[in-house]
């Protein structure tokens, strides 16, 4: 049994941002919980990309009915993703990484032991890996357009505009908040239903009943993102055009925020530039207007704003992720987000988030090979 699951872990490490091993091996527990041996064997044989049951059967050398049965079973267990082909009822299936993918799709199965394991896994493996390359697994966007100087927000970073374009909006439970409910009492874990999804992703979540899905009206979705300022939540979107997700993230339990801090503390190395591309904006401070009230320091998720013992607020621009939480509550108008120079912007290249994950996997393999060559 252990051999097949070891092979599965190796395969998962080639998807998206990877699935690194740790000394304690806690990464194995959740995989054994959600994958049967049959699932593991089939997963290992699957190729990257989007394939129908017929195409899968052909490259595996098995009957179409056998391929379809395996694919549908694993999709029902939330171990794969599928989407309908245009103007068709035919599905094509694809592998998904552990994050974002298997972990979030199996949010209903997260137990207190899984939460404890993740508490070890992030600082000892996954956290560094999520920010260890160039492409971001998601993108931080401003709370609203007016926190960006001269309303210079990019169209694909405007949350309200994105929501208004959608014909189907499905919200599901947040895995980060699901982990948080097992820790110290926290208001963010009182409402797990916060992760919004659109298009093919929304259809999959709804039909496969992933994470207590429910359909939102446009108004309900807008109300969620508009309430973020008061709640101190920041926004992240999937790195694709059009985006398939918008998450309202709590600084206390956001897994990607934790990963960003872990990666920043780990220092520089070859090919590690994700944090610089996590958002397309940086805060600018007018020191002459600042009265050192300290509100921005309390609201900054990355602690780019910090107050010293004498009450003076210092701004470390290199830590700013461009969310705008500090700007909205600065009553002196001393803070504003500025769009980065054109050469520093990271423009999504794919039209579906899972295509971006495939691109991440190729990038990871190339950089890992370069690092090995450099020693």
Image (cartoon, rainbow, N blue to C red):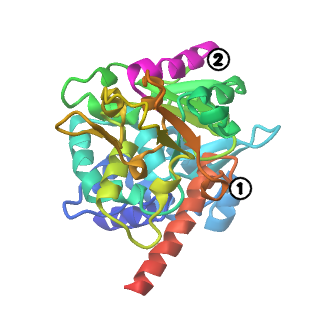
Residue 35 visible within the image: no
Asked whether the residues under the numbered discs 1 and 2 touch, taking CB atoms below 8 Å apart as contact, a structural biologist would say: no
Please tell me which of labels 1 and 2 falls first in the chain: 1
Height in image: 214 above or below 121?
A: above
Left or right for 179, reference 42: left
Q: Quadrant of residue 13?
A: bottom left
Left or right for 2, reference 66: left
Q: Is residue 201 magenta?
A: no
Residue hosting label 2: 218
Magenta stretch in the rendered image: 216-234
Height in image: 112 above or below 59?
A: above
Alpha carbon of mark 1 to alpha carbon of mark 2: how far? 38 Å
Q: Is residue 224 magenta?
A: yes
Q: Residues within 10 Å of mark 1 (few under 14, many from 20)?
A: some
Image location of residue 138, percent across then percent down = 52, 46
Which sits in the foreground, 185 or 274?
274
Residue 14 visible within the image: yes
Q: Secondary structure at mark 1?
A: helix
Q: Secondary structure at mark 2?
A: helix
Residue hosting label 1: 54
Which sits in the foreground, 372 or 99?
372
* Residue at 61 percent of width and 66 percent of height: 60
Image location of residue 86, percent across then percent down = 80, 41
* Residue at 46 percent of width and 22 percent of height: 228
């Amino acid at each position: 049994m252990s051999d097949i699951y070891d092979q599965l872990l190796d395969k998962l490490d080639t998807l998206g941002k990877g699935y690194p091993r740790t000394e304690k091996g806690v990464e194995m527990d959740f995989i054994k919980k959600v994958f049967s041996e049959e699932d593991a064997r089939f997963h290992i044989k699957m190729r990257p990309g989007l394939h129908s049951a017929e195409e899968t059967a052909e490259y595996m050398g098995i009957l179409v009915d056998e391929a379809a049965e395996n694919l549908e079973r694993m999709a029902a267990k939330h171990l794969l993703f599928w989407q309908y082909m245009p103007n068709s009822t035919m599905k094509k299936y694809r592998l998904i990484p552990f994050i974002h993918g298997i972990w979030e799709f199996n949010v209903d199965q997260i137990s207190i032991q899984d939460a404890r394991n993740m508490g070890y896994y992030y600082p000892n493996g996954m956290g560094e890996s999520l920010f260890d390359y160039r492409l971001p697994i998601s993108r931080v966007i401003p709370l609203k357009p007016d926190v960006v100087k001269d309303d210079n927000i990019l169209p694909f970073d405007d949350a309200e505009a994105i929501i208004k374009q959608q014909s189907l909006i499905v919200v599901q439970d947040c895995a980060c908040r699901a982990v948080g409910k097992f820790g110290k009492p926290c208001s963010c874990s009182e409402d797990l239903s916060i992760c919004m999804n659109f298009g093919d992703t929304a259809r999959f979540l709804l039909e496969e009943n992933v994470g207590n899905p429910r359909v939102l009206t446009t108004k309900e979705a807008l109300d969620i993102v508009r309430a973020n300022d008061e709640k101190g939540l920041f926004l992240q979107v999937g790195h694709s055009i059009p985006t398939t997700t918008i998450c309202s993230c709590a600084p206390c339990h956001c897994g990607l925020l934790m990963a960003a801090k872990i990666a920043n503390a780990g220092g520089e190395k070859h090919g590690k530039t994700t944090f610089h591309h996590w958002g397309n904006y940086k805060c600018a401070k007018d020191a002459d207007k600042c009265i050192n009230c300290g509100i921005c320091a309390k609201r900054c998720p990355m602690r780019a704003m910090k107050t010293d013992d004498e009450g003076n607020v210092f701004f470390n621009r290199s830590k700013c992720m461009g969310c705008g939480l500090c700007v909205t509550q600065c009553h002196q108008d001393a803070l504003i987000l500025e769009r980065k120079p054109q050469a520093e912007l990271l423009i999504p290249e794919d039209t579906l988030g899972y295509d971006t994950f495939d691109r991440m996997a190729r990038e990871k393999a190339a950089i890992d090979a370069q690092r090995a060559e450099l020693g």
